[in-house]
């Protein structure tokens, strides 16, 4: 975190005054609040989209069409497009520090979101029957002008925010911690290198009894403490208040929350439980009951349908294009050593469903089952043709058939031999989570260089880490990026063996 937090000690209340003065001194009028920065960025991008869309339509009508330019219609439509994009960006958290100041990711996110917003914009024009008077040629020009200007503008804004953050001109969201001393210490230890989008401004240490079921006398005392905390934090313009108490301290949480909700701040409960083991817990409602969703399928039904359509289309096109090459590879394998041309091995697929993976045979052995020895660099079992195939990844081409069958996807976590899957499920947390999507012919781990022999535990851990990142951040744009990197990135081939 950026600054050492001020601390208050209760129940003697001696620290209230010092904490308040520490909070006041932490304010710096010359620094831009992250909340204000988000509003500024939203305004800038609304302006960029609106002006570029309107200007391109005006230029087109001025140069190509004789009839009068209905500027009020195009201005309103351009403004609606700009506002829709900036509102959607804000709702998706794209203006938050930690996202906006990373140009590569931020620009891709802006491009992806703009395409969705523009598609909806076109549908609305059609539904409202404005397409009869709205030039289709100018609409196409508006897309390219607005999209290009937005991508360039996002890159410039992201760079500018990054410079401002490094110079200390942007102030992160202010967090106040309330809880037992040990809980506060653990939180600060875990988040000592916290992100730029948040910093702990102060912490308030509660007595030990606040973490247990309360007696009536303690309840009254905690209510008094909560009132004083509210007074202190009101003058600090705190953005988030994090209560570090266990589930069992329900009465303490209720007392604190009732008092603190008088502040214009987000109140968050962070109980010290095993919830951190789950990757995406979320609050749900079932009738009048409130609970936690601990896990969910990473892809919705629509996501799976879109991904499947992409797989079938691209796999068919690629298979037709490389069919002559595959015939030549098959002849080369047969000419060198005879025997089987294809290598088949049992693997776990989606939801751990078994399937037979297809590869061109590159070794003299055809191992399967409980004992599978990984290929190593310089492995004597690899044939001469096999060396060429493995280093160029051409041995994977038959898996296009697996993709068309539905056993695999073009992009996803690479499937491992059953023996290795059973081994690493016991050693690496969330390893089995890889099977919540279809395995892929290529994947995020592979294009980042984590492929080949896993002769050290950290290599498999990094591979799984990248696979889980892919699952948690899946999009069609990410699939396209991985497919492009598979062909163009040197990392894809550097660890092949």
Image (tube, rainbow, N blue to C red):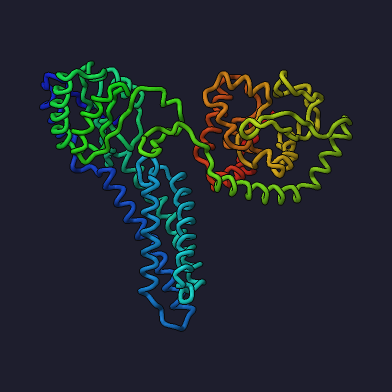
Residue at x 58% of width, y 42% of height: 482
Q: Residue furthest front?
A: 287
Q: Observer-nearest residue: 249 or 410?
A: 249
Q: Residue 308, can we see it?
A: yes
Which residue appears at 64% of the width and 43% of the height?
487
Q: Residue furthest top?
A: 208
**Left or right of 412: which side holds 95?**
left
In the image, residue 424 above or below residue 312: above
* Closer-to-camera residue (321/476): 476
Residue 159 in the image: state x and y as whole percent: 38, 46
Q: Judge from the rendering whether residue 450 lies leftward or rightward of residue 50; answer left or right.
A: right
Q: Residue at x 48, y 71 (%)?
A: 138
Q: How many marks?
A: 0
Q: Is residue 146 above or below residue 200?
A: below
Residue lying at the far bottom in this picture: please name it: 66
| Quadrant of the image occupied by residue 1 | top left
* Image coords of residue 424 (percent x, y): 60, 21
Residue 261 is situated, as x and y percent measured from the top left of the image, at 21, 37
Is residue 491 at all visible to an observer of this figure? no
Q: Say which quarter of the image contains residue 267.
A: top left
Above or below 497: residue 396:
below
Q: Is residue 475 left or right of residue 345?
A: left
User: Where the C terminus falls, by quadrant?
Assistant: top right
Frontmost residue, 252 versus 97: 252
In the figure, residue 385 lies in which quadrant? top right
Q: Position of residue 88 (x, y in %)?
A: 39, 52
């Amino acid at each position: 975190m950026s600054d050492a937090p001020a601390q208050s000690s209760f129940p003697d209340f001696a620290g209230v005054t010092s904490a308040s003065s520490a909070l006041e001194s932490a304010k710096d009028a010359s620094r831009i609040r992250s909340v204000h920065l988000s509003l500024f960025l939203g305004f800038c991008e609304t302006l960029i989209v609106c002006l570029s869309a309107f200007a391109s339509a005006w230029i087109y009508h001025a140069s190509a069409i004789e009839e009068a330019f209905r500027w009020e219609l195009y201005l309103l439509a351009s403004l609606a497009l700009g506002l829709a994009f900036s509102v959607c960006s804000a709702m998706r958290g794209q203006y938050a520090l930690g996202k906006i100041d990373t140009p590569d990711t931020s620009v891709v996110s802006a491009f992806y979101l703009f395409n969705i917003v523009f598609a909806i914009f076109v549908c609305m024009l059609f539904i409202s029957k404005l397409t009869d008077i709205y030039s289709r040629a100018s609409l196409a020009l508006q897309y390219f002008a607005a999209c290009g200007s937005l991508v360039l503008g996002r890159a410039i804004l992201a760079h500018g925010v990054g410079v401002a953050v490094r110079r200390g001109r942007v102030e992160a969201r202010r967090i106040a911690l309330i809880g037992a001393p040990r809980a506060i210490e653990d939180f600060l230890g875990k988040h000592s290198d916290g992100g730029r989008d948040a910093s702990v401004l102060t912490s308030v240490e509660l007595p030990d009894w606040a973490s247990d079921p309360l007696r009536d006398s303690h309840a009254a005392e905690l209510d008094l403490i909560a009132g004083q905390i509210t007074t202190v934090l009101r003058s600090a313009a705190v953005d988030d208040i994090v209560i570090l108490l266990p589930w069992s301290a329900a009465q303490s949480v209720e007392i604190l929350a009732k008092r603190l909700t008088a502040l214009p701040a987000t109140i968050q409960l962070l109980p010290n439980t095993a919830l951190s083991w789950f990757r995406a817990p979320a609050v749900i409602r079932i009738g009048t009951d409130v609970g936690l969703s601990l896990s969910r399928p990473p892809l919705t039904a629509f996501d799976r349908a879109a991904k499947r359509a992409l797989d079938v289309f691209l796999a068919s096109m690629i298979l037709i294009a490389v069919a002559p090459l595959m015939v030549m590879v098959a002849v080369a394998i047969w000419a060198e050593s005879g025997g089987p041309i294809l290598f088949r091995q049992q693997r776990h697929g989606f939801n751990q469903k078994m399937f037979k993976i297809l590869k061109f045979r590159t070794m003299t052995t055809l191992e399967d089952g409980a004992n599978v020895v990984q290929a190593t660099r310089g492995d004597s079992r690899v044939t001469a043709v096999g060396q060429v195939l493995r280093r160029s990844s051409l041995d994977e081409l038959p898996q296009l058939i697996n993709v068309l069958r539905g056993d695999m996807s073009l992009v996803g976590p690479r499937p491992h031999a059953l023996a290795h899957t059973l081994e690493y499920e016991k050693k690496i947390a969330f390893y089995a989570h890889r099977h919540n999507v279809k395995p892929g012919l290529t994947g995020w781990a592979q294009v980042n260089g984590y492929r080949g022999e896993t002769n050290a535990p950290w290599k498999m851990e990094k591979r799984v880490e990248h696979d889980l990142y892919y699952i948690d951040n899946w999009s069609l744009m990410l699939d396209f990026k991985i497919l492009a990197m598979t062909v163009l990135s040197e990392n894809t081939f550097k660890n092949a063996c």
